[in-house]
Amino acid sequence: MRTPTSTYRLQIRPSLTLADAADLTDYLVDLGVDAVYLSPVLTATTGSDHGYDTVDPTTIDPARGGEEGWRRLVDAAHAKGLKVVLDIVPNHLGISVPAENPAWWDVLTHGRDSAYAPWFDINWDAGPLHLPVLGDDGFEALQVVSTDSGAELRYHEHRFPIAPGTYAEGDSVADVHARQHYRLAHWETGNTELNYRRFFAVTTLAGVRQEDPTVFEQTHERIFRMIREGDVDGLRVDHPDGLVDPEDYFDGLAAAATGLWITAEKILEHGEELPDSWLIHGTTGYDAMTEINQVFIDPAGEETFTDFQRTLVGDERDLAAHILHGKTQAATILLPAERDRLTRLVPDLPAEEVRRALTSIAAHLEVYRSYVPVGIERLHAAATAAREEHPDLAPTIDLLVLRLADPTAEVARRFQQFSGAVMAKGVEDTAYYRANRFVALNEVGGNPAQFGMEPDAFHRAMARRQEHQPKSMTSLSTHDTKRGEDVRARLAVLAELRELVTPWLEEFIDRSGITDRSFANLLGQVFLGAGLIERERMHAYAEKAMREAFTGTSWTHPDAEFEAQVHAAVDLAYDDENLNDGLCRLLALIEQPGWANSLGQKLVQLTMPGIPDVYQGTELWDDSLVDPDNRRPVDFAARRALLDLTEAPWIDGTGAAKFWVVRQALRLRRERSDLFTGYAPVVASGTSAHHLLAFDRGGAITAVTRLPYTLSTDHHGWADTVLPLEGTWRDVLTGAVHTGDTKPDELFGHYPVALLVRD
């Protein structure tokens, strides 16, 4: 087993190629990292910065360094003792530029007779492939263009093949188009008439049929060669919930990847466990992120923020209502084509009733999917809730759920894929931009219904993690997080500053001019978490956030008036003297407790049960917001310079203190992995004991400060609090030595965190 002690995520792209990553391996080793963790590297759509739109799964992307860059990276990493972990994307392929995807081009050319037709999840019975690419000029701009290999249909920059024997000189464009295995249509028909499975609501990502063993082998050929040649030590599997049968997929992957460390981007909802039958080592860490976020939030702030959202913002809906509404909208507005495909699989039931029933069951399902027969009780619970919501549909629901519970039924297999898309689009990408009581909680895999977590609950969660997922990845930031880890750390302080924060939020909401006051509340909180970052970055965030919220505007039909309100409100926070002054005063109060939270949550994540990942650049303070903001280039030169540190720097705006904590923790995990094999709480006593979170991993003790603002204001510091230590311990962060009952003032004399080993 090649399980790493830690990973460091790099976003490989044309501006940070595999060769560039090879040049960073010495830095990563000095930082204490055990494995370089790469975003997808197979050939992606030209210009793709993320790589999740693979167009050719058989080759390494030339724009990312190609085969030569791959060899250079692997050789450099292994020469320095670094493992290599690779992100792979089995669920879909990119089709926005058909000519760049050889398999898709062949399918467009030859239809269901193509050798690659089995690759894609296409409903051929519904007619030719529906391609929603045309604008308002439609067929008027379509033309036939002769090429060296024959001829093509062209629509502006878009190219489509012409099947052999379907074009002769003198044929009209309309006649040629009518003879193809596809039909070009207006872009707005994508959500309603599509006849191929896509990734969520993204029509430019076509679903792949990994349930077919031949397709599985063909689309994984390059990855399996990497494994056979010893190039990779671990795999991160993107979006397994999109597959018909994730368990079967992981069985096949494990058989080909013996000894590799495998994690899956599986979003676990509150109370959900990873299926025991999956042959993987855990998730990619959103569940761990939620546990860490929660323990640094003061539960005492819940009433204030709940009342504020209801009375001053005017939002009477609770989270459950927002989620139900968001998921219902996703099923009916974003995903009706998928819902209609399901409906056609039960032709003996009334179609309209089936559509309504499918929408309601998916909206009430509390997890992404139920993996029937595993988790079948969640499916039945959703059906019960659907009957209560729509009593008139009870007979249809009764008959439908019998089929949805049958794992061999086609409608059940496809419903699993549908419900996951409904959850992702309806909750994370919609409800979490609307239910803005406390946005620090509105994160991927988060649980905004829970407002904070006490240390004893955290310890129970960590004990379960140690028992069931000791090799699962843990994360604080990813390429998909809505707000960066240090933004969330600062937002957590708002729960402690509640009586000071809400007046400014009220003023901002009132003066913003934004008709959606809940969205104004979100924007105000983000200013408090991120601070006065570069104005253009905040404008970009606001644009994405309001379109995701899908209340006053949307991606497909932007409302110019509403968007102007939001952008004016952004400028107001920067330009209005009184509003800006109030914001700056709050930011000054948030700064130091925010730093304490940042160091605390980082040290917890790096030392808790599981394998910690450091997302690129987050070894320094990170003020990133949602993608693509969190995928900005990283200044590695500045980080390299900090490797020269020989003693713990003081905490300041440079982030050097965070760098030091990260480096010392990663080095300890790599060099003394024997100290991280168990989990036991270390419980402080005294007046302020609940402000101290500590645990022993089997020889290494982590101790951090929580709720730092109220620690200083409510109890006049640590008072009589002590942390019991048996024997003598040395803090690897500062070198300080502690014995027996230790006062936090001594333990945290330099940093509000400590990492102890027996001296």
Image (cartoon, grey):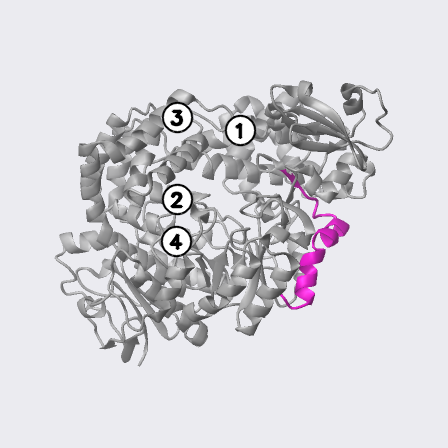
Q: Looking at this view, is 154 or 431 the one in front?
A: 154
Q: Are marks 4 and 2 in contact (CB under 8 Å)?
A: no
Q: Is residue 756 above or below residue 503?
A: below
Q: Disc 4 versus disc 3: distance between alpha carbons? A: 35 Å
The residues tagged by marks 4 and 2 sit, at their Cα atoms, a distance apart of: 20 Å
Which of discs 4 and 3 lies nearer the camera? The answer is 3
The nearer-to-camera label among 1 and 2 is 2
Q: Which residue is mark 1?
A: 387
The amino acid pointed to by label 4 is Glu
Q: Residue at x 23, y 45 (%)?
A: 587
The residue identified by callout 3 is 563
Residue 140 belongs to magenta span: no
**Camera-side residue: 129 or 688?**
129
Mark 3 residue element:
helix
Label count reads 4
Point 76% across, 35% down: residue: 108
Residue 625, numbered label: 2
Residue 214 included in the magenta stretch of the image: yes
How far apart are the alpha carbons under marks 4 and 1?
33 Å
Q: Position of residue 235 (x, y in %)?
A: 59, 59
Q: Residues within 10 Å of mark 3 (few under 14, many from 20)?
A: some
Q: Amino acid at mark 1?
A: Arg
Q: Is residue 667 left or right of residue 109?
A: left
Q: Give the side of residue 674 with respect to residue 519, left or right.
A: right
State the extent of the magenta-drawn residues as a range.
Answer: 205-233
For the N terminus, give its image quadrant: bottom right
Question: What crowding class fits label 2: few (fewer than 14 Cα within 10 Å), some (14-19), or many (20 or more)?
Answer: many
Q: Secondary structure beneath disc 1?
A: helix
Which dot marks residue 291?
4
Would residue 560 appear left or right of 381 to someone viewing this image? Answer: left
Q: Is residue 387 above or below residue 723?
A: above
